[in-house]
Image: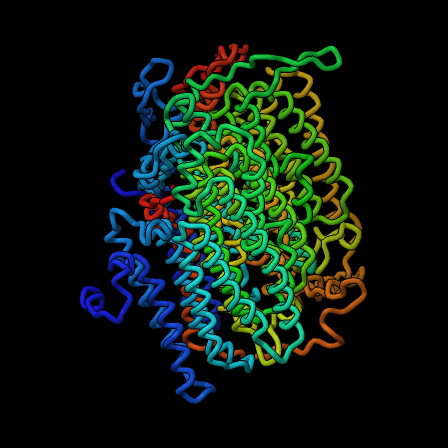
Amino acid sequence: MSWPILAVILLVPLGGAAVLLGVPASRPRVIRLSLIGVTAATLGLSAVLLVSFLAVPSKGASHLTGTANGQSLSQVHSPVSFQFQEQVSWLHTSSSLSQFHPAFNEGNNAFNQAGPPPINFSFHLGVDGLAVWLIALACLLFLVAAVVLSRHEERLKPFAVLMLLSQVGVIGVLTSLDLVLFYFFWEAALIPLYFLMIGWGDERRGRSALKFIIYTVAGSLFMLLAILGVYFVTGAQTGVYTFDVPTLMAAQSFVSTTHASTFSLFGHSFPVLNPQDWLFLAFALAFAIKVPLVPFHSWLPDAYASGKTPFLVFFAGIVSKLGAFGFIRYNLTLFPQASHLFQPLMMGLAVASILYGALAALAQQDVKRTVAYASISHLGFVVLGIFSLNIDGLNGAIIQMVNHGIVIAALFICVGIFEARFATRSLRDLGGLAKTMPVMAGMFLVVALAGLGMPLLNSFVGEFLILLGAFSVSPAWAVVASLGVILACWYMLRMYQGLTQGPLRAPGGPEESSVIEQAVRRVGRIDLGPVELVALAPLVALMVFIGVYPGPIIHYSRFSAAQYVQAANRGTVASPAAHRVVLPGSGHGGQG
Amino acid sequence: MFRILTAVPWLPLHFVPAGNLLGILPILIVGGGAVIVLLADLMIPRRGNLVLPVVSGVVLLGALGTAAGQWVVHAANPIVFNGAYANDRFALFADFVILVTALAVVALSPGYLRRRGMEEGEYYILLLASVTGMLVLTGALNLIVVFLGIELLSIPLYVLAGFARDEPLPQEAAMKYLLLGGFASAFLVYGMALIYGETGHTGLVAIHHVLTAGAVAQQFDPMLLAGIALVAVGLSFKVSAAPFHWWTPDVYQGSPALVTTFMSVATKVAAFAVFLRLFSATLAPYRAEWQVPIAVVAIISMVFGNVVAVAQTSVKRLLAYSGIAQAGYILIGVAVGRPDGTQASLYYLAGYAVMNTGAFAVITILSRRGEDCDRYSQLSGLVRRQPLLAGLMAIFMLSLAGFPLTVGFFGKFFLFSAAIHDGQLPLAIWGILTSAVSLFYYLRVILIMFGGLPEAAPDGELKVAGVSLDGAAVAAPDAAVTVGVPEGVVVVLAGLGTLALGIFPAVIYSLLQGITVVHG
């Protein structure tokens, strides 16, 4: 592609936000339509990106300069191939030692020692077969959120501007190929999200927002240290001081990560953690909080319960995927040996998330919290797939990230519709609504079934591949994790049945007329309106399409899955799964 | 011109070669400006006159231009006055930051003094005198000159702290500042005396040569170590690092907000300039001895400042504790001691000047007769009354918290990078942990300004130990705060600067690449 499509995708929402700032707040219709226009344009661009990415045969990209272990690094390619790369220098420092006045630099002086290594980072953008799917998902969900956003929303203009800024941040995280740039977007995206959280939502939103930000940033700050650690450790061992992700990925082949010694505890011997392991843990902490995995999840139910529907569509839909994306992009490729060392830990946390999320979802009366805990459970599957460290598991994880984004957005739209009509989201207050809202009940059924992993709907594909991958590593974990699928049926159908079946129950009273009357009073109608239908229809269509015909998405994400598995298996004792790494030309024939 | 002047027999200038005077030209300009303002104050009618601020501004601009010229020309030998002063790029960089801060303070002054009802000409004289002291300090190459600079910057500040003469709190602040400042000076001068006693020199170049010569450096020398320790204590007081910070919260809160702005930014920059030159450069041979204690002071400052800031309900007090924490972060660069540590500290100081000046500027704009409106309850829902001010304040808070897009991020990035490169992992880890704590109080200020939620309005929080800090009833702040043009320019420029330097770190970093430090 001759034009910098990634930069354009980043700049369109940013420019849109600037334009929206100029629209007077008294013109809500104009604001909403321009918001839809901008997000639709971004979606169009991401579709172009996706199509042209899939059309181009992958090829290795980056080169290293310098030597390590007597071997020239210039021959080495990044294990993951990136396309549409664009690079502009951001900060470039020389490593000159003469910052201090030379005339006085004699003698036993600390400044005669080696000066600082050069600090270079750049605006380096690029995508692989993992990122393109997530970018497309992100752009779709932002468009859906724009459609869902009512023009009667209070303070519409700042909401729209902040939404577009969030989009810039999210796409920036997905496209950056420089650790500093990545961290920059990763944290900067939190700023509009924070303002969206404190400005719109229920009365507990301030507390929820603070909790979310402190959790996330606390984890991210350790990642910042680890980013610097990667820079200096890699630099010291290979002579290549860089924040450039493809270069670092390639350089990891030369970083010594052997566990020199062990210590024994309770009769078992454990390896003493080396720097790579600590760096892995620091990255993993940031991503585990973002996903979230179970001991770090407590911000999520509050944040999801407090938020408004349009916010939740993209917040739950795409922001939580960034953690899983980080695991794949950074943990697997930068710390291959640590990934294997901590595989049991990560799979254990994933299974714990699956079960805990499912059980907690069962215990909720608040439908938003049910969906929130269901989300924790579903994302546990994604992480389980990632740390299976084989092609099936990783391929399933990539697909499941997309699927979960679609399903969770649809679920939040659905429960948002109930909340808007009856001003409650408690299962105790609602019931039997199928008769008065037949279209809504039908849509909700499809969404709920997709959420529980019904065959012929999208989640089944991803969960099946993940369990397949997990089974080949550890049958026990796979069996326990599949309990999560069973529990998903329980909590999803409990929510669906509670809301739609049985005797009519709503805050207005048991009479059908009064129920309809209060809904009409609040939103003008009882069943789905055209806008809500337009928002839900593409999501439901995608659920059915991916469920019925998963071939293309499996096929086109499998190449990346294989590359990441190969990257994660560098320098490790080949596991049975590793033998099966074949870079597949075709989707289904990939695993031997 | 100097040749002509030295030819005049009755001027004692022939003792002073012209190059020496050129070397301290910014000091001469600001010091002379103070005298001009003093005279002008006698001749013009007192109140509401813009002559003094304009003259002060022109003087500071002149000094700034001169410093910029010196940076460009960059004398091959920046040492003047027989090794007493160096106008190297290190000093010039600190001078920039100080002069720009002082300019911002002068621009904010007329409006602020009018609102607070304390328009006095002495204000500008004292301000310029203090700036003179700071400029002396940045390039000081002799212990005596260091002491001279410290006193010259401090004494006007003691007066400025109590400038709101009719209010009790500023009086208390000024008294506290004077007493504790005197203590710190005593520590400093005692430490200097011990160093002089052991090395036989007061010039930093000579001291460095003695220390590197081996005669002293090779053996354990309790007197010298005690001297270094006492100097460190005195300087830690000036940069308000814990545990030598006890004056900071009361003085920052009690002083008029604009004086606090100046005190918290410019003083810190000048004192850190000395700190960096003395420790990272002159005393570098003793790095093994002072590194751990300085690192400990840095960690205590970060922990104490950030943790105590959580409990505050006044923005001025919050910024005081946050200033202690920021001093801890900047001390990371001192403790690292290498060129990258020095660069990181200077970068952070520049960023700190922009964001902290901005945050205080917002508070000064909100002030009114008799008080500064800085309590959380007075900021509640500010976005509805003053959306621009609230937005800018949010930027400053995010920057102080170290978020990307703002200068605070790269400040911390370079500091942690220097610490890790030097193998000082504990410093970086404590920095990370305390940064996480700091999010709580910075973001809460944003929440209060933007949310105005029931829980965010700090009903219960205003009572500390059963005493309502706010008195019985808090009068609603004036809905119609008028933002004057110079004030608006300052605060908007600070906001834009915070963002621009946060997106393009190379702007400052490329300057720091060319830094030279004369140290001995």
At x 55% / y 34%, what residue is drawn? B221
Image label count: 0
Specify the farthest residue to the front.
Answer: B9
Residue B260 vs residue A237, the one in the foreground = B260
Q: In the picture shown, does residue A445 fall above or below B54?
A: above
Residue A579 vs residue B211, the one in the foreground = B211
At x 47% / y 14%, what residue is drawn? A571
Q: Position of residue A583 (x, y in %)?
A: 41, 18
Compared across the picture, whether A238 is left or right of A201 comes to left
Where does the N terminus of chain B fall, quadrant-wise?
bottom left
At x 33% / y 19%, what residue is drawn? A67
Residue B467 vs residue A105, the one in the foreground = A105
Specify the farthest residue to the bottom.
Answer: B45
Q: In the picture shown, does residue A7 fall above or below B42?
A: above
Q: Position of residue A21 (x, y in %)?
A: 43, 64
Quadrant of the image occupied by residue B449? bottom right
Residue A167 at least partly seen: no
Q: In the picture shown, does residue A433 fall above or below A495?
A: below
Residue B16 at least partly seen: yes
Compared across the picture, whether A67 is left or right of A165 comes to left
Q: Position of residue B326 (x, y in %)?
A: 55, 51
Compared across the picture, whether A148 is left or right of A63 comes to right
Residue B420 vs residue B402, the one in the foreground = B420
Compared across the picture, whether B97 is left or right of A318 comes to left
